[in-house]
Amino acid sequence: MKTQLKSQKETEVENKFFSDLTSALIECCKVEDSEALLNSELDTMLREVEMNLQQQGLSFELYEQFTGKNKDAIKADLTDQAKDRVKLNLILAAIVEAENIEVTDEERNSELETIANTYNRDLEEIKQIFAQNMYQIDADILNRKALDVVKENLKK
């Protein structure tokens, strides 16, 4: 029990640190606004809302009825968050490029194994699911590695 509580607290502290770190990056770095990237991120976030609803057994149409908001109104609510996500992604992409960060096959396979274990699925099944979208796996790894670079530089 003590070990579990300690692990939980360490995870909370780490999550808070990375949340604060990403907020600081967004605040301090200047990034040009891109309407195309913002619209793309809003579409992605709307799809995420739809997928979360489906996982809960709800339809998007039912959600619209409950909230009284259509897709455009929901996108409007998500705009600030989408702007931050676009800005953070651009900052992290710049760090990845500047530091020549790459994803190894071992890191990709480890990430896929973690996903398979999390969802109690077969690794080969997960590989098939992500086969057309492996860039998402790579992007997650690259972003974590870029944040690790920032974290290490803060220690110096």
Image (cartoon, helix red, strand yellow):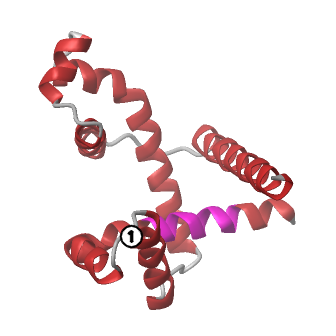
Q: Residue at x 26, y 27 (%)?
A: 75
State yes or no: residue 78 in magenta: no
Number of marks in the rendered image = 1
Which SS type dominates the magenta stretch?
Answer: helix
Q: Could you say which is closer to the camera, residue 79 or residue 30?
A: 79
Residue to which mark 1 is pinned: 137
* Residue 52 figure quarter: top left
Asked if 32 appears above or below 72 in the picture, the reply is: below
The vertical placement of 133 against 40, above or below, is: below
Q: Residue furthest bottom?
A: 105
| Residue at 23% across, 36% down | 57
x and y percent of residue 60 in the render? 17, 29
Q: Residue furthest front?
A: 1
Asked where in the image residue 123 lies, by quadrant, the reply is bottom left
Against 10, residue 32 (above or below) is above
**Residue 74 at x, y percent in the picture:** 26, 23
| Image point (41%, 36%), residue name | 83
Residue 79: % across, % down: 35, 28
- Image quadrant holding the C terminus, namely bottom right
The one nearer the camera, 71 or 101, is 71
Crowd band around label 1 with a 10 angstrom C-alpha radius: few (<14), some (14–19), many (20+):
some
At horizontal 77% and vertical 67% (from top left) the residue drawn is: 152
Q: Secondary structure at mark 1?
A: helix
Residue occupying the far top of the picture: 68
Position of residue 59 in the picture relative to residue 34 (left or right): left
Q: Which residues are magenta?
A: 140-150
Which amino acid, by three-letter code, is at mark 1?
A: Ile
- What percent of the width, then of the height, locates residue 68? 21, 9
